[in-house]
Image (cartoon, grey):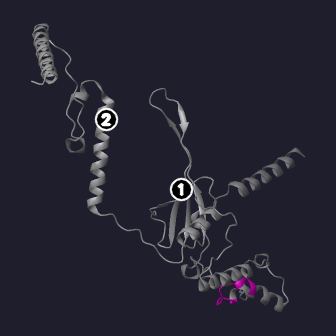
Amino acid sequence: MNRNIGVVKSIWSGVSKRLVHYKVTPKNYPKVNIKDVELEKPRYGFRKERPALLSQEITDTLYPSADIKQAYLEAGKPVPIRYRNNSDLIAKRHYENYKEAIATGEAHFRIGENEVYLPKARVVLLKPSAKHTPYQARFLVPRNFNKMDLRDYLWNLYGLRALNVTSQLSPVKLSRTGADYSTYRRPQVKTMTIEMDEPFVWPEHAKEKIDQYTKQAKSQKDAIRKKALGGMQELNESKAFDGLYKRPELVNTFVPKRLKKQGSSIVQDYKKHSESKQDKELLSNYLGL
């Protein structure tokens, strides 16, 4: 009995070991012809070919959602979720109103009802960056300005149509002072970008103007630096603004004692002479001499 159990145990352990750890040697590899093996199988032909969707057949319209929705309804199929809204109908209506406003020369939007005769907002036209096209313009606006305010502002003052207005708020970073290393934040800057129906190319600056502004900025920097240094640096001659920025000449109040004594006697003699001369003129005028 024990012998049979040992034989079965050895056979089972050998089979399990063969199943798990068995490795085929090269001499036992199956004999296969290399021409019958396809190493790179094609990536097409194994999928089911389906007919084109109804949404792919409509390509010759500016607002396809309405036509695609109608095609699904006529075919008796459920309309996809992306085509169930009326966004294209609203966009088509806005486009027709825009063309009519351009033809009549009126505003293409509803103008604000609050009348402002002296606007206090500062709207500055900025130079476009590399990502902007000639049909886009960028403005620096106050932080309490919204898109409707800018659109009304440009239309009422300049007759400019702002078609698409986007706003950007610059991120503010922490800055440190040089004295006590305290942190503070600078105020945020708000810019708005609009799209126009006509292109605008920013004019190039003349080289003479650039050189003039560069020289003026350097002169201002030198003058401020000389004033901030203090001490003996203030006595040095400054070349800022072509030498026009000179230090004020102080009065020399130091007088030696010997010169002061001589000068006081001269001043007293002059006073006596002038007083006697005035007295003689008064007496001659009184006597009629």
On the image, the x and y values in percent for residue 175 come to 51, 38
Quick check: 238 left or right of 145? Answer: left
On the image, the x and y values in percent for residue 69 come to 78, 85
Span highlighted in magenta in the image: 57-66
Q: Which residue is mark 2?
A: 225
User: Residue at (60%, 62%) from the top-left corner?
Assistant: 117
Magenta: main secondary structure: loop
Q: Quadrant of residue 46?
A: bottom right
User: Regarding mark 1 in the picture, which secondary structure is present there?
Assistant: loop
- Residue 62 counted in the magenta span: yes
Q: Quadrant of residue 161?
A: bottom right
| Residue 251 vertical position relative to residue 191 in the rendered view, above or below | above
**In this orientation, which residue lies closer to the viewer: 73 or 287?**
287
**In this orientation, which residue lies closer to the viewer: 62 or 9?**
62
Quick check: 254 left or right of 14? Answer: left
Disc 2 + disc 1, Cβ < 8 Å: no
On the image, the x and y values in percent for residue 276 come to 12, 15
> How many other residues sit within 10 Å of disc 2, few (<14), some (14-19) or many (≥20)?
few
For the C terminus, give its image quadrant: top left
User: Residue at (61%, 67%) from the top-left corner?
Assistant: 151
The amino acid marked with disc number 1 is Arg
Q: Which residue is mark 1?
A: 122
Q: Quadrant of residue 242?
A: top left
The amino acid marked with disc number 2 is Arg
Q: Nearer the viewer, mark 2 or mark 1?
A: 1
